[in-house]
Amino acid sequence: MSDEIAFDRSFDVPAGRLDQVTPLVRRIVAPNPSPFTFTGTCSYILGRGTVAIIDPGPDDPTHIAALLDAVRGETVSHIVITHTHRDHSPAARAIQAATGAPTVAEGQHRAARPLAIGEVNPLDASADMDFRPDVVLPDGEAVDGPGWTLTGIASPGHCANHMAFALAEEDLIFSGDHVMAWATSIVAPPDGSMGDYIRSLERFAARTESVYLPGHGGPVRGAPAFVRDYLAHRVAREAAILRALDRDVETIPDLVRGIYIGLDSRLVGAASLTVLAHLEHLVASGRVVTDGTAAITGRFRRAA
């Protein structure tokens, strides 16, 4: 099984420009490019006249002003949040203050699992811990406006409160950071869970929507096949970890060096946490053992 994914990194949309992506959807990219956000966060405006803003983005005054200018003369009925990382949700406060619209999300930010004794969550600084949705949307429930309906799809993995949203009228999904065309999603414990992520991908692979609009980069096209490639990549990554353990590679730093050849040095920390996420999944499934709780500083070996 190949772990090759046909990524599309040809997204050259400038920050601040309002683009019509589909008949119902407009997009503005925030000016927050980085190795983790690609060219910036994609904020979407859904509908005409009465609209929803999906993922208003970081607390950046320029981006907030661009979003408010784009909906001038329209009514914002909902501010929809896929998840509460700081590149997606903080601008909701300013947008709400200007429009009065309620926020909609799966829930507040939380870790995917309890912290171990002495463990510190390295991702706390990237989380919007103050966010509390006005409307907590259960899996499968919907919010709507004139000509559009958004149905929540609980998709934990990247983080515990991640929710994608299906747009029935255009047969597409706003996928947040769950599935993106330009790269795989980071799954970093204790914020995220690889077991949850793989189960969420399996759920998406069974869906029929062919287009996803992600939180970063351009649209995912041929989405069901692309999700299957995502799943194959995760299976192949765990196979690579198991092969390394068979060669008596025991620690996460050594696993990262052996698996992520040519990795950008800025991404070593993220890769280490992703390997930890895979190891947690392998330990939970009985294929790998470690002393005590799986940890970034632990030593790992194949189960007998």
Image (cartoon, rainbow, N blue to C red):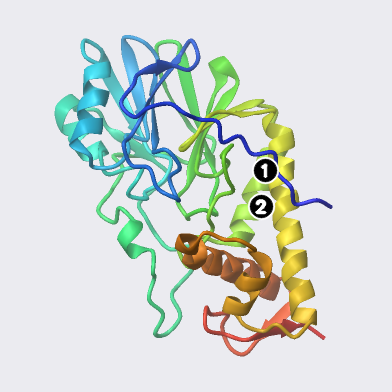
Horizontal arrangement in the rendering, residue 187 relative to residue 231 (left or right) = left
For label 2, the residue is 199
Question: Mark 1: which secondary structure?
Answer: helix
Quote the CA–CA distance across marks 2 and 1.
Answer: 6 Å
For label 1, the residue is 203
Is 302 or 245 nearer to us in this picture? 245
Amino acid at circle 1: Arg
Is 146 or 116 nearer to us in this picture? 116
Horizontal arrangement in the rendering, residue 88 relative to residue 184 (left or right) = left
Q: Is residue 87 above or below residue 296?
A: above
Residue 39 percent coordinates (x, y): 42, 38
Residue at position x 79%, y 73% in the image: 243
Residue 19 percent coordinates (x, y): 40, 17
Residue at position x 60%, y 54% in the image: 197
Residue 131 percent coordinates (x, y): 28, 49
Q: Is residue 85 above or below residue 261?
A: above
| Res 1 seen here | yes
Residue 79 percent coordinates (x, y): 32, 31
Residue at position x 75%, y 86% in the image: 248
Q: Are marks 2 and 1 in contact (CB under 8 Å)?
A: yes
- Res 239 quadrant in image: bottom right
